[in-house]
Amino acid sequence: MKADSKTADYPWWLKTLAAIGAVALVAGLITLFSSAGRRPGQLWSTHSAPVESAEFLASISGVTGGPLRSGGTAELLNNGDQFFPSMLEAFRGAQKSINFSAYIWETGQVSDQMLAVFVERARAGVEVRVLLDGMGGMKAPSMDELKAAGGKVVTFRPARFGKFTRFHKRNHRRAIVIDGTVAFTGGAAVADQWLGNAENEEQWRDTMVRVTGPLALTLQSAFADLWAFACGEMLEGPQFFPPAADASADRPGAMVHTGLASLPASDLHPLRLFLAQSFLSAQRRLYITTPYFVLDEEMRKVVAERARAGVDVRILLPDEHTDAKLIRLTSHHYFEDLLAAGVKIYEYQPTMMHSKCIVVDGKWSVVGSANMDIRSIELNVENALGILDEGFGRTMEATFEEDLKRSQQFHLEEWRKRGRWKKVKEWVASRLAEQY
């Protein structure tokens, strides 16, 4: 009997290859868009000590592998009107080295100003190193003048053969260090949307933190390991890691910090543990500002549990000015459960909110490059500082409260009344959460 199916005309080996391809495609889709087998089904702590306690500091340092350091200073800088002049002043004062890593570098006014200073300092004998990201630096201008002046420019995972399978794992770190003594981290990068004072839709709302002393050395480490990975050069010597001579380290109540430089190569996801432990230790207040809120289910449960335990949990996000509409829809998919647990949620109204700040009980602050999303926690290369200092914590809380004055709060009953079509769009967007 003659077979009716056209597939009977194909040789067995071709059918086998097609079957293997189909299996590979399904496996790839599961890997990219499913959380199956990726994380434990629950997060909890055997003892969530207050953030100011020695137990908390020892635990968070032990779990994440970052040493505890005392001394130094941290200053919160709001918007480009504050952080760009501070950064340029530090660059102009560099005597030995400038190391610069940020995700985005685009042509424009900010780029021109920074390159001019870098070229001038390189000609003066300062060692200038710029680490561009293969994706975020695609719009960067020519660096030939800086190279001719003696500066070094390296691209992290450029789009070329041998790199494509890891191209989606980007360098998102903000590690900007001058002479190993002054450094900056936070949400900003090199593009003109960070100019100004968030006075209109073109000027993003963002923060950077200027640190000195041991905190600067921690950020130097976050630059040095990526630089060595990208080009093979290992940074050593006092121009990068000056001997510790911080008198503030010995004073009572000195600032204490730990740092985390996360890598997507690790399935342990240390940034996830770092954030979860910070959340679990909140006793009174937990304030989170982030441009992208797509935490995994277990992390969202941790946040909701703290609210149910009576902690004042507040989350500040961008409104429709966001540069990532699908991520905002995904965040909305989670609102109802969080609001029902007692979490207070706000969206910043005037412009794009890009700050990445956490403050716990007004004492423990987390700043750096990481967003509250799965991509930052599990796929990107990120860095964060955890700072125990009541004065800095008060500044963080005061800034958060000022931002709330320009934000809209969501309420559970009103939120439940949103249209069915909006709920459908939120659900569809949330299916891609593993890649946001």
Image (cartoon, grey):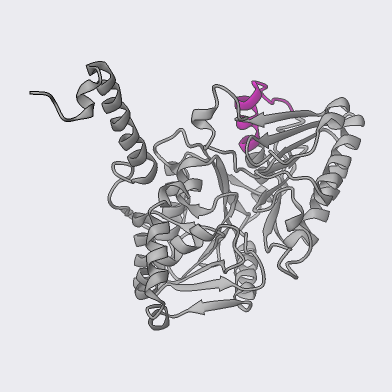
What is the total number of numbered labels drawn onto the structure image?
Answer: 0
| Picture coordinates of residue 146, whole percent (x, y) | 84, 31
- Residue drawn at x 64%, y 75% as measured from the top left: 402
Q: Is residue 138 above or below residue 409?
A: above
Q: Quadrant of the N terminus?
A: top left
- Residue drawn at x 81%, y 45% as measured from the top left: 111
Judge from the rendering whether residue 397 lies leftward or rightward of residue 147; answer left or right: left
Q: Nearer the viewer, residue 152 or 311?
A: 152
Judge from the rendering whether residue 290 lies leftward or rightward of residue 190; answer left or right: left
- Residue drawn at x 79%, y 50% as measured from the top left: 87
Residue 74 can be seen, yes or no:
no
Q: Quadrant of residue 120?
A: top right
Q: Main secondary structure of the magenta part?
A: helix
| Picture coordinates of residue 98, whole percent (x, y) | 78, 36
| Picture coordinates of residue 296, whole percent (x, y) | 38, 54
Q: Which residues are magenta?
A: 221-237
Judge from the rendering whether residue 374 lies leftward or rightward of residue 179; answer left or right: left
Judge from the rendering whether residue 428 lies leftward or rightward of residue 315; answer left or right: left
Residue 116 can be seen, yes or no:
yes
Q: Is residue 164 magenta?
A: no
Q: Is residue 232 magenta?
A: yes
Seen as rendered, the residue at the extreme left is 1
Seen as rendered, the residue at the extreme front is 2
Seen as rendered, the residue at the extreme bottom is 413
